[in-house]
Amino acid sequence: MIFNNESKTEILKARERKKYVWFVKISILAFCVSLMLTFFSEFILNKVNIIIAILLLIIFMLLNVFSDMLGLAITSCQIENLKREVSDENHFKICIKLVKSSDKVSSILCDVVGDICGILCGVSGTMIAYICASLLPESNFNMFLGAIVSALIAGFTVLFKAISKNYAVKNSTKIVKKVVNFIFVLKNLKNQMKHKSRSNKEN
């Protein structure tokens, strides 16, 4: 098929429009999810003790690190390596889709999930500092407690992200394969649930 200059220009413009639409969509999604989860976490954290607050902080931190690692692995994965290591055709197709859509996938994982979990880590840290301050006697130390907790959260997050990013770059193909295997497990479970529901309706 032969394209003239005008048709090529139209195709490029259409692609640019799709990119802008995607940017708007991902920004709105990030805003809505962040707002919802922040309100939810503040509501939950206001009713918990320090142990549960610390557990929630660890969960949010791990999600932050894990999503960042997945996004980087998918972005840095090479199609040539997948051709050598993925034998199943269906798995290979999904792997290629992930890699070719790495900009969108990494935006969701790193920018949406990762940044939102970072915000929730901050909310959790603030609540932990508040609980600790309420348990301790009044002193000048309470003024610096919030800063100390925030610094610890930032330090551990940077440390774990550095380790996970190094692992993601070195094992990108392996990570993508595991992600695709997990996707197929979810698909199989979904199909099994549909089959059971149909069987129950027929009975």
Image (cartoon, rainbow, N blue to C red):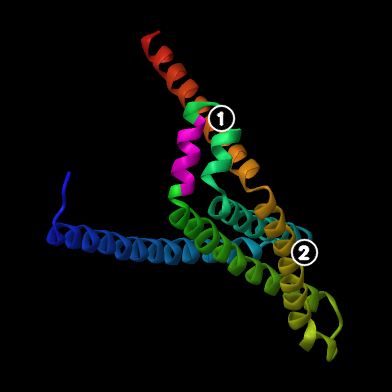
Q: Which mark is residue 185?
A: 1
Circle 2 — which element?
helix
Q: Position of residue 8 (x, y in %)?
A: 19, 58
Q: Amino acid at mark 2?
A: Ile
Q: Where 108 falls versus 97 (above or below)?
A: below
Left or right, 9 with reference to 193 = left
Q: Position of residue 63 (x, y in %)?
A: 64, 55
Q: Which mark is residue 50?
A: 2
- Badge 2 or badge 1: first in the primary sequence: 2
Give the crowd class for mark 2: few <14, some 14-19, many >=20 residues within 10 Å. Answer: some
Q: Quadrant of residue 148?
A: bottom right
Main SS category, magenta section: helix
Q: Which mark is residue 29?
A: none
Left or right, 12 with reference to 38 = left
Q: Position of residue 166 (x, y in %)?
A: 71, 58
Classify the position of the C terminus by image quarter.
top left
Circle 1 — which element?
helix
Left or right, 57 with reference to 38 = right
Q: Quadrant of residue 59?
A: bottom right
Q: Amino acid at mark 1?
A: Val
- Viewer-closest of 74 and 110: 74
Q: Where 130 falls versus 63 (above or below)?
A: below
Q: Quadrant of residue 23?
A: bottom left
Looking at the image, which residue is at 63% across and 44% down? 175
Looking at the image, which residue is at 83% across and 74% down? 135
Marks 2 and 1 in Cβ contact (< 8 Å): no
User: What number of labels is visible?
Assistant: 2
- Viewer-closest of 56 and 170: 170
The residue segment tinted magenta is 91-99
Looking at the image, which residue is at 72% across and 64% down? 162
